[in-house]
Image (tube, rainbow, N blue to C red):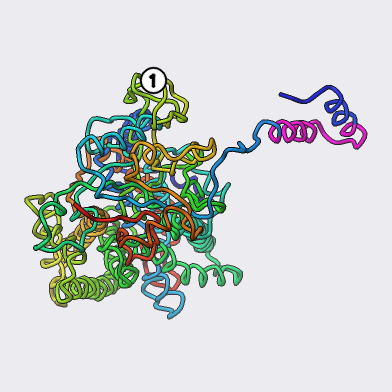
Amino acid sequence: MLELAIKGSRKYWSWVIFLLAVIGAGFVSYLYQFRVGLGVTGMSRDVSWGLYIGQFTYLVGVAASAVTIVLPYYLHNYKKYGRIAVLGEFVAVASVIMCMLFIFVDLGQPLRVLNVLLHPTPNSVMFFDMLVLSGYLFLNILCGWYVLGAERKGVPPSAWIKPFLIVAICWAPSIHIVTAFLYQGLPGRHYWLTAIMAAKFLSSAFASGPSLLIVISLILRKFTRFDPGWEAIQTMAKTSAYFLIATIAFYLFEVFTAFYSNIPGHIEPIKYLFTGIHGHTKLVPVMWICTALIAVALPILIIPSARRNERALGFAAVATFLALWLEKGISLVVGGFVPNPFERVVEYWPTVPEAFIALGVWGIGLFVLTILYKVAISVKEEVVFDKYGERQIGAK
Amino acid sequence: MSINRRQFLKIAGASTLLGLGSITSIELLEKVEASQLFKKNPKAIKAKRWGMVVDTRKFQTEEDYKRVIEACHRIHNVPDMGNPKEEIKWIWTDTYEHAFPGQESPYLSGDIEHKPLIVLCNHCNNPPCVRVCPTKATFKRKEDGIVMMDMHRCIGCRFCMAGCPFGARSFNWRDPRPFINEEKSLPYDTTFAGGSIKKGVLTFPTRMRGVVEKCTFCYERLAAGLMPACVEASQGALIFGDLNDPHSEIREMLSANFTIRRKPELGTEPSVFYIIGG
């Protein structure tokens, strides 16, 4: 099926070349980091993780969120998701690849990465994260590719794939729970040391993932002949709305616990993020932009008439995806390190090479996604009708 | 390589007879070599669990701190990166309120509140850094509880830095070697209690970029029969010994004085104790 990716329109090739250029810029920046060391980033002795680990964390969530499509479809036979299940799985594939790359570019000694396999250490959560991410990548490539292949041949998928589909559904939350455990089991990092971390990770993932798929679906409707289905888009918006509400609630639970208990260690990071401490306010705009975006997006996702407006919905989906990216992709990591173990404030902001490397990894992820989607859309264009006999290809 | 011809022929002959591959015979030869090269120094100082008492009463002048910190940083070739962002330090000072956050009070005597305290890796009995390391590059030594670093295995993921609640770990954000003042370097077995000092000799391995490092309680000096550099240079202000030996000097200090540890509520069981006093 891969051959479908090398036959495309001018627009397709321009997009591919644009992505390759972004990847190239990221790669050159990475060579610079590889030669000089991680000192080229904004990370420091006190804020020793930054943008890279933030992206990793956020993207694990996006990967896990494929389950919000696959579960209703395969377990509850929700037919409207029949056309887009593979889109969810392919987002998971691209996201997991980005996760792995973000870990890789964050390593001080990247050439020693296989030490994790050479000296397996089950007491380290990182070890399990590696296992669950690799497993999840395999499951999504297998399930996505196989089911799409069956669609192309016009036959129902064989029964042997069923157990893999079920395992993939159960597996999805595990990747994000384990990622939360990287943080929430560390003593002395007050912002992370909370049992609700895993729950909040899952809820924010299941809000941002569907938002991304809404954006992608709207783009596909506009630029290809494939129609993911308006009702499917609406259902994803509802999923996103519910989980966004849960995420806000979980965050407010944290705020309540910190401020009502009045324990300084719990209060300080939240204060730092929203108001700044001792004049250190680098993350304050990040948090308030995040808050503003959510304040605008949530009503659109909740109110039916607004949600049914394609442009408003598109805006709300982008806003949700961005807001949660600011929260999880940037502030979550930094908040754990500020104040530092000496109750001193050392701030962090990514540098230009760091941003380029991050962009490069996103570029690789989008490239993988583009190739996979090109294959999927081409197959669907050939098939014309989805498995329930409804037209999935427009007359465009 | 101290293996005589007779031994070599025995191994070579035996491996040929047994039809073993050449790799196996090389392995056998290596074993002989290793066992003969690495004999434990009979003078090595041993303990079941090393610990330290910081007697802050004995740190009075700026010189008292400087002597201790420099002794460590000079023999371990700790680079001076020149900026706080990339700073590398094994032993340093901070004030009471920062070293013991949550234990300060508005009515604390100014002397104690602003007095610098020596801080270093606590060599915890339950080290979170060891728990989180994905490659066992940092590990607790079974025989004496020292939390060690294997700079050759470390992949530089910095999980240990996030895990350590004491800020004891430093990362080599770039190649540290140009930032080592070789003029000031001292051999690792320098005696600080007197005697001649050979300057400009790097005997302790320098590190490369991208790995984490920290205090290792001078395992290399203990193996050579010397007390840790900071302890020796402190002139009695740092007391080092076996926490598991009820008759050791450190245990006597601990039973005769009231001591506190940093962040005991986290359950890491630090092995460094503080006697707080002006």
Residue shown at 17%/64% (left/top)?
A316
Q: Residue at x 44, y 39 (%)?
A: A110
Extreme residue toward the right, this view: B17
Q: Residue at the location (56% across, 40% down)?
A: B44
Is residue A51 among what the camera can see?
A: no
Q: Residue at x 49, y 67 (%)?
A: A168
Q: Amino acid at mark 1?
A: Lys
- B78, B150: nearer the viewer: B78
- Regarding residue A97, the answer to whether it shows in the image is yes
The x, y position of residue B263, in whole percent, is 30, 61
Horizontal side of A250 relative to A281 (left or right) equals right
The magenta segment is B14-35
Residue bearing mark 1:
B199
Looking at the picture, how far across and down is residue A238, in whole percent? 25, 75
Q: Which residue is at the far left?
A: A279
Query: Where is residue B97 shown, x and y percent of the image?
Result: 18, 55
| Residue B22 sits inside the magenta stretch | yes
* Quadrant the C terminus of chain A occupies: bottom left
Q: Quadrant of residue A57?
A: bottom left
